[in-house]
Amino acid sequence: MNALNEKEKTPYVVTSKSYTAVAINAASKAGEWIKSRLGTVGEPGTKYSPQDLVTEVDKGAEQMIRRLILTHFPHHAILGEEGVEPGPEASAKALKEAEEEEFLWIVDPVDGTTNFVHGFPFYSVSIALAHNGEVIVGVIYDPSRDEMFVAEKGKGAYVHGNRMLVSGEQELAQSLIAVGFPADTTYALPINMVAVQALAPQVRSLRAGGSAALHLAYVAAGRLSAYTEVGLKPWDIAAGALLVEESGGKVTDTVGTPYQLSVSHVVASNGKIHDALTGVLKEANATGLE
């Protein structure tokens, strides 16, 4: 992205030192590279297993994003999925250490890795910037559709340069709600299955796309009424939470406490159905917080 002087600046063509411009540039370049690797999955003679390949793509994309950020902001800290050991305890510990930083970039290089492996075109790059623990920039890029979702704290959220607004559904019965099937089969998956069972009869329909970041972006864009899942990580939620809030929606944990970086059990909605949704989760003991 070329640097322009302040007089020429527009929301999508900004000086190279703008946090948002760097996030957009990093997400775009990483996303295009990830997409270019898609055709190598399952090719005859490939020496990588699908899991190895995704590990390589994840790590390569995160390294690319790190380089692009640190070129402009060498003193900023970065919390990326690939730099943290698996498991909720490790991610909580990494976040606690990173939260002390004034400027913290929170990166998920490929959100929806299972989809990527199978060639299912619903995966994304998620990049957020937090200042003293508060997310101030959120960017989610969907390379399959070339959709860039962008939010700045207090300035609204945009896709294709158009302002996003959450949907207007007033009741659960009118609502399209996204859920998740997490990889943690011992703890998070059973709770999410209880939530699915409780919500299914009360909503218009449920969806499970397999990318938390894109689910959040779709709530912001008004394509989903809400999204809820237990057992997420900071990098799954940070950018998307700002998108939803800046589009007029609401993001909390599953019992209604306002979003902060440590939240891992999330409800993001258009705001209008939020209390009804958290009420169903509480009644079903599906909050993960009892």
Image (cartoon, rainbow, N blue to C red):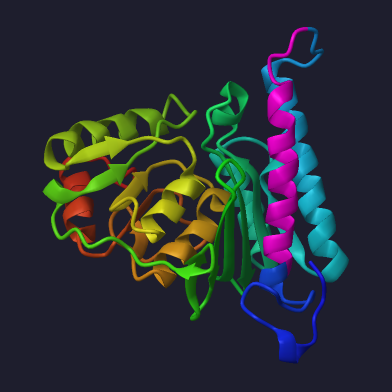
- Percent position of residue 64, x then y: 81, 49
Q: Is residue 288 among what the camera can see? A: yes
**Horizontally, is 126 left or right of 231 in the view?**
right
What is the quadrant of residue 143 in the picture?
top right
**As drawn, 132 above or below 27:** below
- Looking at this view, is 75 or 200 the one in front? 200
Q: Quadrant of residue 89?
A: top right
Q: Residue at horizontal 37%, vertical 62%? A: 251
Magenta-colored stretch includes residue 32: yes
Give the image location of residue 40, x and y in percent: 74, 22
Work out whether residue 74 can be spotted. no
Is residue 197 depicted above or below 20 in this figure?
Answer: above
**Relative vertical location of residue 260 with respect to residue 79 in this rendering, above or below:** below
Question: Magenta part mainly helix, strand or loop?
Answer: helix
Residue occupying image coordinates x 12% and y 41%: 202
Q: Residue at x 15, y 60 (%)?
A: 170
Magenta region:
22-44
The answer to whether residue 33 is above or below residue 252 is above
Q: Nearer the viewer, residue 44 or 171?
A: 44
- Residue 244 placed where, x, y %? 41, 63
Residue 101 falls in image quadrant: bottom right
Residue 122 in picture, x, y percent from top left: 51, 37
Specify the quadrant that holds the N terminus. bottom right
Which residue does the image show at 35% across and 71% down from the upper left? 248
